Image: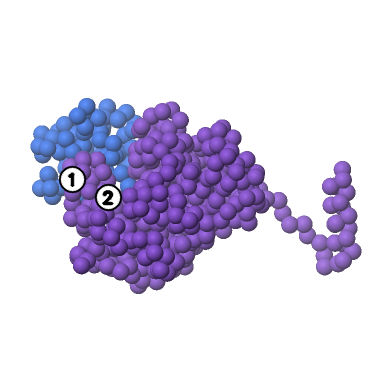
Chain colours: A purple, B blue
Amino acid sequence: MEKHDGFMRALKCRECGREYPLTATHVCEFDFGPLEVAYDYERIKRVLTRAAIQSRPKSMWRYRELLPVAHEPTVGLQVGFTPLIRADRLAKKLGIREAWIKNDAVNFPTLSFKDRVVSVALSRARELGFDTVACASTGNLANAVAANAAAAGLKAYVFIPADLEQGKILNSLIYGAHVIGIKGHYDEVNRLCAEIAGKFGWAFVNVNMRPYYAEGSKSFAFEVVEQLGWRVPQHTVVPMASGSLLTKIHKGYQECIKLGLAPETPYRVHGAQATGCSPISTAHKAGLDFFKPVKPDTIAKSLAIGTPADGFYALRAIKETGGAADDVTDDEIRDAMRLLAETEGIFTETAGGVTVGVTRKLIASGKIAPQDSVVICITGNGLKTLDAVNGYLGKPREIRPSLREFEALMAQEEKALKS
Amino acid sequence: MAKTVRIPTPLRKLTNNQELVEVNGSTVGEALAELQQRFPGIQERLLDEKGEVRRFVNVYVNEEDIRFLQNQQTPLKDGDEISIIPAIAGG
């Protein structure tokens, strides 16, 4: 028989282990450590088998027992189960035997992995009786909250840095969300939202709902494992902003092993950042287990978090699995975006450029061996960050609608090719 | 005019639900010590055994993270506002 809290047991402090009831709260009262959902794995193991999962609809909710809702989910039922693509042409360019792209650039409905965390946070917010949801966002999360809240009939407030890409702003406004632009960078938006969340009785998905929200990222790992034929990949390269996705992918792999869904094989998780905002990769490269906050300056705005809340845990997960971390410049980001587009036909946003660019670096430096297999996590869509490549891709050549002009153009091209 | 400390929700049980507390200390460290005097127990929530600000606690003076200033030695002047905020997830 299912308990009132489903398969969740409690909220537990990641620092000191103190337990709290399953409410909308996110920090330990004692040491401010982040709270995480604890599950009853014994009960989950009895029901969550490969066969059970495979009999369910193709969405992230096919792993529902490992996601923090008490009852059936009510928001975002179609989210997830995005393609895992064998990327042979990219692998060749990167100099590795096998590469896979997990493509959340086509996640439903707002084209980023944030739909995963939001469908969990909003389903749980409803269970806890909220009618207004909110978030602090670098853009993608705002889009996901706005869209999923609209579809669920919830009121939404989203807080973003005012200088965000136009595409990401319009992509929140269209859903009728209250969009508040803050004149400051994301860390400042975050600070303000922490203060607002303490005052207004809203479900802030990445503040007081964070323990539930963050768990949604695990579905990314579950899908990779299932799509690879129930095995954990040797290498996974993950973009890092707050570091939450990386730690949750690590946790997702561990849960698959613990529940017997995948055999226990060694795996490494690697972290990718933009050089203009690289507190975590810088700390890892210096051999530190703590990071120094930075002021972000990068075109990868969705990764521009200078004070990464899960930085410590990301560093630990990288170290534990024998992974590495690195960062790439704005130019390397654009090059990598282009490389992925030209080899695999996938247009990712700047964060994806960071991940592909860092993968290339890790292979070149031998941290990922050329005979190995790597999964590259693509978390967002290039159509949202057009500003970042505008002016770098050349321009279409224009002619009048005349065959003669076209033939002249082709002749010119041939000449250019020969010379 | 004194300096004001904004107390975050998780700590208000210790301050009798007071959200704003006035202090006189001339550095962040002194202000935190003053809080401890008035609300015993609050310091160990904010500082670890070595007396450093705990890694999941962010302290700001007028919207600037003290790690970009002089940490606990950051000087305070009248009218300054100090915020204590738990770290938040990405977005």
Tell me which residue sits at (41%, 62%) in the image. Answer: A60
Which label is found at residue A171?
none
**Placement of the N terminus of chain A among the 4 image quadrants:** bottom left
Closest to the observer, A220 or B20: A220
What amino acid is found at the position of numbered circle 1 in the picture?
A: Arg
Which residue was labeled with disc 1? A18
Q: Nearer the viewer, residue A38 or B73?
A: A38
Q: Nearer the viewer, residue A395 or A350?
A: A350
The residue carrying mark 2 is: A36
**Label 2 SS:** strand
Going by the image, does B89 lie left or right of A58?
Answer: left
Q: Position of residue A325 (x, y in %)?
A: 47, 37
Q: Residue at x 60, y 56 (%)?
A: A346
Tell me which residue sits at (32%, 47%) in the image: B88
Pointer 2 or 1: first along the chain: 1
A403 up-or-down from B30: above or below: below
Helix, strand or loop status at disc 1: loop
Q: CA distance from mark 2 to mark 1?
A: 11 Å
